[in-house]
Amino acid sequence: MASATFTGVIPPVMTPLHPDGNVDEKSLRQLVDHLIDGGVDGLFALGSSGETAFLTREQRKFALTTIIDHTAGRVPVTAGVIETTTARVIELVDDAIEAGAQGLVATAPFYTRTHDMEIEEHFRKIHAAAPELPLFAYNIPVSVHSNLNPVMLLKLAKEGVLAGTKDSSGNDGAIRALIEARDDAGLTKEFRILTGSETTVDFAYLAGADGVVPGLGNVDPAAYVTLAKLCLDGQWAEAAALQKRINHLFHIVFVGDPSRMSGSSSGLGGFKTALTHLGIIDSSTMAPPHQSLNDEEVARIHAIVDEFLYTP
Amino acid sequence: MASATFTGVIPPVMTPLHPDGNVDEKSLRQLVDHLIDGGVDGLFALGSSGETAFLTREQRKFALTTIIDHTAGRVPVTAGVIETTTARVIELVDDAIEAGAQGLVATAPFYTRTHDMEIEEHFRKIHAAAPELPLFAYNIPVSVHSNLNPVMLLKLAKEGVLAGTKDSSGNDGAIRALIEARDDAGLTKEFRILTGSETTVDFAYLAGADGVVPGLGNVDPAAYVTLAKLCLDGQWAEAAALQKRINHLFHIVFVGDPSRMSGSSSGLGGFKTALTHLGIIDSSTMAPPHQSLNDEEVARIHAIVDEFLYTP
Amino acid sequence: MASATFTGVIPPVMTPLHPDGNVDEKSLRQLVDHLIDGGVDGLFALGSSGETAFLTREQRKFALTTIIDHTAGRVPVTAGVIETTTARVIELVDDAIEAGAQGLVATAPFYTRTHDMEIEEHFRKIHAAAPELPLFAYNIPVSVHSNLNPVMLLKLAKEGVLAGTKDSSGNDGAIRALIEARDDAGLTKEFRILTGSETTVDFAYLAGADGVVPGLGNVDPAAYVTLAKLCLDGQWAEAAALQKRINHLFHIVFVGDPSRMSGSSSGLGGFKTALTHLGIIDSSTMAPPHQSLNDEEVARIHAIVDEFLYTP
Amino acid sequence: MASATFTGVIPPVMTPLHPDGNVDEKSLRQLVDHLIDGGVDGLFALGSSGETAFLTREQRKFALTTIIDHTAGRVPVTAGVIETTTARVIELVDDAIEAGAQGLVATAPFYTRTHDMEIEEHFRKIHAAAPELPLFAYNIPVSVHSNLNPVMLLKLAKEGVLAGTKDSSGNDGAIRALIEARDDAGLTKEFRILTGSETTVDFAYLAGADGVVPGLGNVDPAAYVTLAKLCLDGQWAEAAALQKRINHLFHIVFVGDPSRMSGSSSGLGGFKTALTHLGIIDSSTMAPPHQSLNDEEVARIHAIVDEFLYTP
């Protein structure tokens, strides 16, 4: 099963930028090494944390090609193909195939109003454009403003259209209900369920999830790798203790002043500032119109990283 | 004033498609003639009604170029440059300049979480990329999931960044409040306010709006042109009566069964079916994953058009 | 038709309070005179502007009884019977009958999740508890968090359950659509449609509405009475001009600092401060946990009133 | 510490009704015995599951008095004091004191728009009205339409205003973040955090929660008591397995047809139907305007109960 490889810790790879806004290839290669050295099971390129919504098609291609090239088969690489509607997604599917991606992650249509029957057709057509690549449905209501219907997901799983889902709804109860419905339908191996919630990975594993796609995993991949192992070994108290430590590190995403910037600026700014502090990437530049953190905020992020990073 | 030309009835031009999904150039040229013959004051290409969120970049360029070519200067053409974030919008700005557009319409960032300070920077950077073209801010919360802050709009108007707004919020009270704030700020001529609400054009004019961008204007441009004239002439009772007739024609957008399709499919399907019925375009094909109307729904739309079209 | 009397300007009577939180009977009687002297067509007691959600059952009874007593038949008085669910509303219906109310205004159930079939049964049971009193459905999604379905409203109108609606959705297009559907159904006289939007009364009348329930009408009833007359006389330009003046007076509701208080505190505080300034009521006290305006805010409200009140 | 008693499994006691809508005292007493025999640690009267939003003040008093009388001190009884605003809540506080409740549960204001500063004052005033009774803040955004701010909660905890919270947001990540912030603030013993999510009790305990208020606990109290024990004993795999079984029992809340009724009707109907099936209460009558389950739905609920009840 192709999708069987997409389990465990699969961070959404950030896209380092030069101060002029271009993709910083050297930093991106260093970040890939940082993640693989940290023990991750796969990489997810061009996700929300990778600022895919901010990159031009050429920048997306360049970032994806660089990640795949530098990974050099050490772990599987999945590519986000995130666009408003079907034909536009399929253009990105072509780019992903050309770049050598081993899996695809697509959302429901956005900007347009949509409907379950339309979302279903959307995923069918994407799968038809790349039938050999495992396709993951990405549930991210904060961006797409609709929730993927679990009944539809399992129907498409049964048909072989979907190989799994990445759920960034933040609703752990709903993820568990999906896992239970999947297992009751006998699709445990066919449909992989990954959580996108950095702070409740132990919950997801306890409920039977297959892995996690943690943005914070860019900063501290080994912490998540260790956490996943503790969960797989049934050491739940130790897992929860490590999760708690990780959650304190996660506070770096809340440092940016909400009167001055969005949660996207504060969150990605926190991650990029931490990565700069750790010497993994050269600049914490974010794509416009993201707002920058100020010196005081940067200092607070450094202090949090220094205190709570699992792997010094 | 460049923006002074963007007043009156400016329909968002639909994008006719062949059954294979490609842009139907012949039908698009016929539609442009239909609109200009109907007396409209301008055209807005690549808006939501133009299925811009469903078109690839090449299809967008082709549609825009065709519209501008066929218009041949008879009325000004504004181009939607609707993308998730700044750099991606600016790519479309370059395309629009190359195609010869005379104005630009951009939304706030979407998919990403955003913030007023980021939206402000977004519009500034778009304007800087095309300082000679009037830039309109497009308020469409049903798609973008945020509302443009009126204080920010007028600040950017004062600075010369924005030439106006197209408001598709459906909130006539908020549009009126914006008009009053604009007038109080002495920006009446500098900042044009266009409503996107097909069914309350008389309200908008009564409050002092400068025009309307009606999706339904694709079907019945002359009705809107007449309505706008009645408003400008202060014949409000007659305007309201015509608006009422138009609103019955507008029922074509509600025919599609909501258990089978989104409001986008039902609405654009209603418009395209009507245009096919009128012989303006060859096919009512919508871009995937839009769902098609069935025969019974098509027949009901034909009946509504036959009864309520203002200009037979 | 009983409901025929519920047209025109029907302000939601505020509930003046003593600094100790008790209902200020003397001020309430003065307010009733102020409204009737201003020429209003009816009074709506115990609405949202009357702080009904803040009053105990005894306070509600006292306020309603006082209003009806002091009105002494000069205009009809409708009573809000606003409670979470059916049995609780019916208790208030009993109180309203005992007090001598001539009409009832009820919302859909709130706090609980609800459904169109439940809302329908809710209104049926309320009507059955007072079949002789016209019952108005109150659409106020900002409080109730659901929208009344227009198809359901007209169904209940046809059955004689509902005599009309007060719509405080702020969606003028939806109010117009309801008016058109009502007229198409031949229910123009049977189902009265009143807008709750202070700033778009001319819009509502232009679309065929029967009246307005303006919170700001507590402050300046004669302005609304004049506005309604201009609308009925078809003097739309004059109506819009007066509406614009009124809308500047309406700025009193935005003075309260949103970092310190809710829109309810700011809005009701603005109205009560204005009424105190005009000498109609003795204290601008609001029920807890409303927050008070500070001296600077009070001064700004006074200045706005002094500049924009229609009737000095 | 008074609040120390409010830990563990504390079901929100349902309110059995006679077919005529009156509270069924005999069934209520039987339900209390069923819960206490099941081993629960406390009872929560007049919560959402107790249909408090559907009961008149007299019915509330009767239900509360009956529960406290029949409990006879075997476990502590907390009373919901759920009303729109402060003065109305305080009336219920008086009733609760008179009935002998040992704790109080209040929401933020609803129906009215509100603000953190107002919510804070609301809780302060409620606490001042019953300083000797532990006060729990009830976070239930599906009903109240706002979320309690965790910073505010801990501030009020520090001051001794709040003894804890019941969180029915369904957001397990947010509950964990609140637990972590509480522990970091040194308020672990002073501020009790109870989850209202039936299907993720193991998650909550793993994160450090103090207990659960499960609506489904009315049907199967011993299952929750066993689940809580497994969690306290660190038997997480066994806990998750039992949670999974419970979650299949929880499917009784989804049986009611959503085209015919609200989630409230379906959910409470599922619980009451199960309790009738088990012979605990005499009738599954719900308060109007709740809709009834049909025979087929009832049969499905019986089958689910027969298969998944933990304690036959």
Image: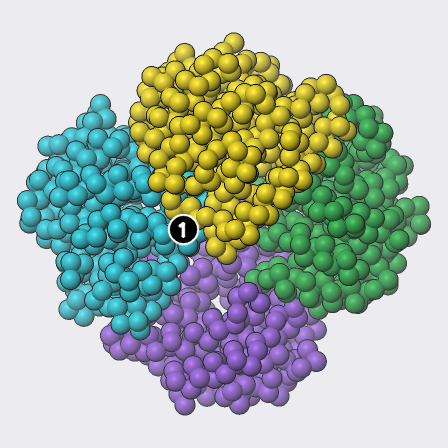
Chain colours: A green, B purple, C cyan, D yellow
Question: Foreground: C211 or A44?
Answer: C211
- How far from the left and from the top, in percent, is residue A10? 81, 43
Taking the spot 31% from the left edge, 24% from the top edge, the residue there is D91
Above/below status of C230 relative to D144: below
Asked whether residue C62 appears in the rendered view, the answer is yes
Left/right of residue C125 with respect to residue C33 in the rendered view: right
Q: Tell me the residue at 72%/54% (across/down).
A: A154
User: The N terminus of chain C appears in which quarter of the rendering?
Assistant: bottom left
**Residue A89 at what x, y percent from top left?**
72, 63
B169 relative to D243 in the view: left or right: left
Quarter of the image holding residue B21? bottom right
Q: Judge whether B311 appears above or below D101 on screen.
A: below
Is residue B208 in view from this perspective?
no
Residue at the far top: name it: D1
In percent of the image, x 47 and y 80: which residue is there?
B300
Which residue carries the number 1 mark?
Answer: C118
Q: Residue at x 79, y 41 (%)?
A: A211
Residue C39 placed where, x, y %?
10, 53
Tell me the element at label 1.
Answer: helix
Q: Residues within 10 Å of mark 1 (few under 14, many from 20)?
A: many
- Chain at tag 1: C
Q: Quadrant of residue A238?
A: top right
Note whether C50 is above or below C186 in the view shown.
Answer: above
Q: Amino acid at mark 1?
A: Glu
In depth, the one of D248 and D186 nearer the eye is: D248
Residue B269 against residue B165 in the figure, above or below: below
